[in-house]
Image: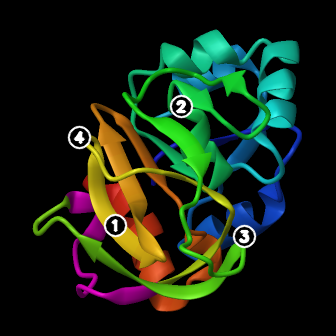
Amino acid sequence: MPNLIIIDTGCANLFSVQAAFARLGCRARISADPVAIAAADKLLLPGVGTAAAAMHNIAARGLADPIRRAQQPLLGICLGMQLLGEYSAEGDVPALGVLPARTAILDADGLPLPHMGWNTVRHQPEHPLFEGIAQDSHFYFVHSYSIAVGACTVAESHYGSAFSAAVQQGNFYGVQFHPERSGKSGARLLHNFLHNL
């Protein structure tokens, strides 16, 4: 089983993500230690709260450069995915800059925000993160900001307008939904992250 580190940004429900990996037989460790992060086989960047608070915590803990320098597969979840971009309009803050993307308020076309609940996801055929997951499978979302569909989009969803449900740039991956809350499809995606990338 890969050595998985969940990066401790101090602003996420780390234990629900850790429990989701435990159900897959993986004993993920929570750490903010740059040495442990560099030595891990896989990295997870969770996120709950605002981009401004998360980037403040990342900077205060000296985690920005260790994340940017990561060579191993790294998966950002929800806010963690948005932080991989260049900038977030949520708090008007620069982000980590490893994805050529920016986060903006979700164009929900009058639908209520946050976008909260189950929604379908359409992914690139053959993408290893979605192996064994049917097109238009349901995943659980909670967000008011999003990354527009663009060059790094590997899956999209729709709430008022289309937005990136999953992104990839090199070894950096991100999902806007919460796989740890997304039943069998979410569990399969986490399995794929552990074993396919």
Residue 115, relative to residue 63: is it above or below? below
Q: Which residue is mark 1?
A: 156
- In magenta, the rendered stretch is 128-138
Q: Name the amino acid, label 1.
A: Glu
Q: Quadrant of the N terminus?
A: bottom left
Q: Measure the C-alpha gap from mark 2 to mark 4.
A: 28 Å
Q: Measure the C-alpha gap from mark 3 to mark 4.
A: 33 Å
Residue at the front extreme of this rendering: 110
Residue 7 falls in which quadrant of the image? top right
Circle 1: element type: strand
The answer to whether 132 appears left or right of 40 in the picture is: left
Residue 74, relative to residue 149: is it above or below? above
Residue at the left extreme of this rendering: 126
Measured from the top left, where is residue 63 in percent x and y? 72, 18
* Nearest to N terminus: mark 1 or mark 2: 2
**Label 1 close to label 4 by CB (< 8 Å):** no
Depth check, mark 3 against mark 1: the one in front is 1
Circle 4: element type: loop
Q: Measure the C-alpha gap from mark 3 to mark 2.
A: 18 Å
Q: Which residue is mark 4?
A: 151
Camera-side residue: 8 or 163? 163
* Nearest to N terminus: mark 3 or mark 1: 3
